[in-house]
Image: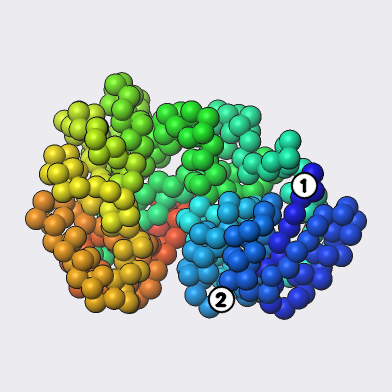
Amino acid sequence: MDTHILVVDATGTLRDAAHRASSQHGTPIAHAATLDQAVEVLATEHYDALLVHMGALGADLESGLQALARGGKGASVVLVSDGDPARLAHAEDMALAYSINLLGHLEPPLNANDLTDLLAGIMDRRVGGDSPVLMETEFVRGLMTDGLTPLLQPRLDLADNRVSSFEVLARWRSPRGALLGAGAVLKLALEKGYMDVLTYRMLELAAEVQGRWAGEGVSVPLSVNVDNRNLAKPDFADVVASLASQFDVPPALLRLEVQDSSLDLDHPPIDAIKDLYDRGFSLALDDFGGGFATLITLADIPFQALLVDRAFIRAATGSDRARMVLECAVELGRRLGLSVVAEGVESADQLALVREAGFSHAQGYLIAPPMPVEKARAYLDDPHPIP
């Protein structure tokens, strides 16, 4: 079965280079002049990979990448630089944050051999007519070695403009060099029943970092996402406590984040969460406003932090009604004695909004992007200026 590539490029330069490269092995190439046009095409047609020129994303990278994440139908993406290395790096970080399956990037001037190798690599990924971004055998092998790479994104305490904690984000580096976001990893883990293994590995990596930092006198909480299915396991609290003990990590330095949308409202994991709480672990409700948590859930489960979904923040920036709802959510969290964290703060306007709304903490690319562990450690000693 043929591999189909969609080139998104207003200039035509990338399109012409891709057609020349494809002629060597017959890969079908289609073209869209704009991102909107590409999304329309993807609504009715399947493509295995998208070659996206940075210019097609527009001036607002966040909006462009969000549109790509929503309309990309899970296709693998290669970004082609417009000559601005800083903008490309920012786009790569944000693409991973939005769970876009990023295979890599190309720099100008475009080299025919690079494009040929790239197209051949995409073709090699096809298995039985399908094109999984991450294969099961590769996933299992990588979990046991170094496939899973943690990146840390700082959270800012708005009271004193200091880093209060980091969120641990899953990234996957395949043997072919592709750096994939959490979307591909979580999809395979859920489909194949590896969610427990993935979560335990992320907790282990976080505990390892905490252990190293403790030896340097650093005491900063790290947050790890857990799924409702993890919390349903009767021994989950024991496993988490064992990992903390193994690396000599105080439980308060490991925060477990439960996604709003993963909660089973008919059978919320109250017992498991209370068990973790009693052992000293911190718990947070993630993506509040993007899921289905109820006031009863917030009242019954001992969460200590409320993380407000990035879409909620964006909506409130341009709508008075949405802003009123946001302020009510913040007031609710504060009345319940919770830290209230604004996720996905990408602009100075959004930061001003969350300060005025009464958030206690903020996280997003305006403050700092996700970064490797070593860079995060250096960031603690010399943080970037906060807007």
* Residue 355 pos. (x, y %): 22, 70
* Residue 128 pos. (x, y %): 73, 35
* Residue 262, image quadrant: top left
Q: Nearer the viewer, residue 226 or 278?
A: 226
Q: Nearer the viewer, residue 311 or 244?
A: 311
Q: Mark 1 or mark 2: which comes first in sequence?
A: 2
- Residue at position x 87%, y 65% in the image: 20
**Number of marks present in the image shown:** 2
Q: Which image quarter holds the C terminus?
A: bottom left
Q: Which residue is mark 2?
A: 58
- Residue at position x 35%, y 31% in the image: 230
* Label at residue 143: none
Side of 83 relative to 223 (left or right)? right
- Residue at position x 54%, y 37% in the image: 188
- Asked whether residue 243 is in view, the answer is yes
Q: Is residue 354 above or below residue 373?
A: below
Q: Amino acid at mark 1?
A: Met
* Residue 211 pos. (x, y %): 36, 35
Q: Which image quarter holds the N terminus?
A: top right
**Of helix, strand and loop, which one carries label 2?**
loop
Q: Is residue 340 above or below residue 169?
A: below
Q: Nearer the viewer, residue 281 or 199?
A: 199
- Residue at position x 13%, y 57% in the image: 332
Side of 127 relative to 284 (left or right)? right
Give how far apart the Cα atoms at labels 1 and 2 are: 29 Å
Q: Residue furthest left?
A: 335
Side of 16 relative to 197 (left or right)? right
Q: Amino acid at mark 2?
A: Gly
Q: Which residue is mark 1?
A: 123
